[in-house]
Image (tube, rainbow, N blue to C red):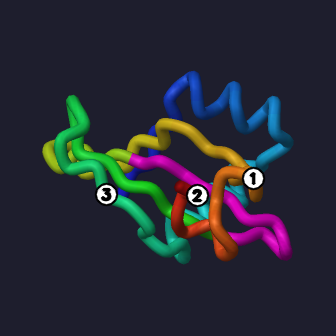
Amino acid sequence: MKVVYRVHAVSRMFERGIAEAEVQKVLSEGEEIATYPDDLPYPSRLLLGRHGDRPLHVVVAYNARDDEQIVITVYEPDPAQWEDGFKRRKQ
C-alpha cells in the first residue's frame, strides 16, 4: 500500500523532529484509538505508537480507490491534554 504525506504532515514532522521511519512504524504497528468515518474526502483515524519512550499520534486517511494511506498530521501528544497512556483526551 502506498503512503502519501500531506504538506501539513511533512511540515509538522520537520518542526517536531519526527522522522519518516517513526511514522512508518506507527502506521504498521500503532493502535487505532479513534475513528473519524465522516471526514472528507476520506474517512480517517488516529493512531498511537511509540518510538522508544516517545508517544506519537498519527492521523491518517485511507483512499480505497487508490489503495493509499494519506498521512494528515503527526504530533507528540501533550500530557496536559491527554490521559495517561495518550488514548483519551482529558475532559
Q: Give the SS element for disc 3.
A: strand
Magenta span includes 52: yes
Q: Which residue is mark 3?
A: 35
Name the amino acid, label 3: Thr
Q: Residue 67: percent from the left, percent from the top?
A: 25, 51
Give the side of residue 65 with respect to residue 77, left or right: left
Q: Where does the magenta region start and end?
A: 50-60
Q: Residue 16: percent from the left, percent from the top?
A: 81, 38
Identify the residue at horizontal 50%, vertical 62% (top origin): 47
Name the amino acid, label 1: Ala
Outermost residue to the front: 91
Name the amino acid, label 2: Lys
Q: Nearer the viewer, residue 68 or 74?
A: 74
Disc 2 vs disc 1: Cβ atoms closer than 8 Å?
yes
Q: Which residue is mark 1?
A: 80
Q: Give the SS element for disc 1.
A: loop
Disc 1 vs disc 3: Cβ atoms closer than 8 Å?
no
* 61 versus 48 height, above or below: above
Per the picture, the main secondary structure of the magenta-coloured stretch is strand
Identify the residue at horizontal 54%, vertical 72% (top origin): 30
The image quarter containing residue 35 is bottom left
Separation of residues labelled 2 and 1 (CA atoms): 8 Å
Reading the chain from its start, which is encountered first: label 1 or label 3?
A: 3
Reading the chain from its start, which is encountered first: label 3 or label 2?
A: 3
Q: Give the SS element for disc 2.
A: loop
